[in-house]
Image (cartoon, rainbow, N blue to C red):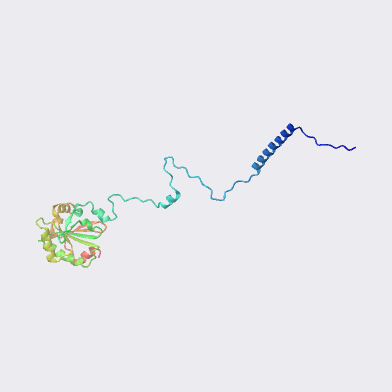
Amino acid sequence: MIRTVRPHRLPAPAAVRVAAALVVVLAVGACGGASATSAPVTTTGPQATEAPPEPATGVPAASPAATADAGPATTAPAPGSTANPAAAALAGKAWATAELTDVATGQPFRIADFAGRTVFVETMAIWCSNCRAQQGRFTEALGRLDPARVAYVVLTVEPSETADDLARYREKNSFAGTYAVAGRDVSAALDSEFGPNVLNPPSVPVVVIAPDGAVTFRTGAESADEIVKLAGG
């Protein structure tokens, strides 16, 4: 005898509950599986980098490029400093920094303006024959020297002599150099530093300023060859 077995059917409410339970189980399993097997996320473009935090003061940090391009730090020269040692050496000397007037051109100048050259400063008087002879030898020597490296300043220290007197004297004798009237203040400053002999024209006084600013005082006649040697020629 053959029996036909019919499938057992759950009542409708029970079937609904079972189906709902299966859906929940499948959903949970899918989530768990995806979490466990998911590959790490990758990006194909450049990854963003986080900007460095700003300093606590609120001033933005300098970028590496700006720091690299800034170059070495420099310090401004101190006020009044100079690269010319002779100018520095003469800066505190009243006779070197006082304004004088070139009797041939009427232009103002200072002895310190020639700093860096060998500078000869001769004090004289028109009536002094020794001075006249010395200025002739200087004119000869200057013709053998580079004017860019040597300067010759002649100052009358005779109070009665004027700029016009000195200009005529220089022109008459065809002397080279820059001639000026010393005046009371410059004469006093020279006397203070070199003594009274600097105001005694017949002794043929000459102040020599080296290119490095060293100052020496000499008296007595010099030959043209000796002047050239003193000038480094």
| Image position of 30 with respect to 132: above or below | above
Q: Find residue 17 and report its image quarter.
A: top right
| Image position of 117 with respect to 3: above or below | below
Nearer-the-camera pick, 175 or 221: 175
Residue 130 appears in the rendering = no
Left or right: 8 in relation to 188 = right
Q: Position of residue 137 (x, y in %)?
A: 17, 66
Q: Position of residue 66 (x, y in %)?
A: 42, 50
Task: Tally the marks.
Answer: 0
Q: Find residue 136 and report its image quarter.
A: bottom left
Q: Quadrant of the N terminus?
A: top right
Residue 12 appears in the rendering = yes
Nearer-the-camera pick, 101 or 57: 57
Q: Quadrant of the C terminus?
A: bottom left
Nearer-the-camera pick, 202 or 9: 9
Left or right: 98 in relation to 74 = left
Q: Position of residue 139 (x, y in %)?
A: 18, 66
Left or right: 81 in relation to 11 = left
| Image position of 200 with respect to 223: above or below | above
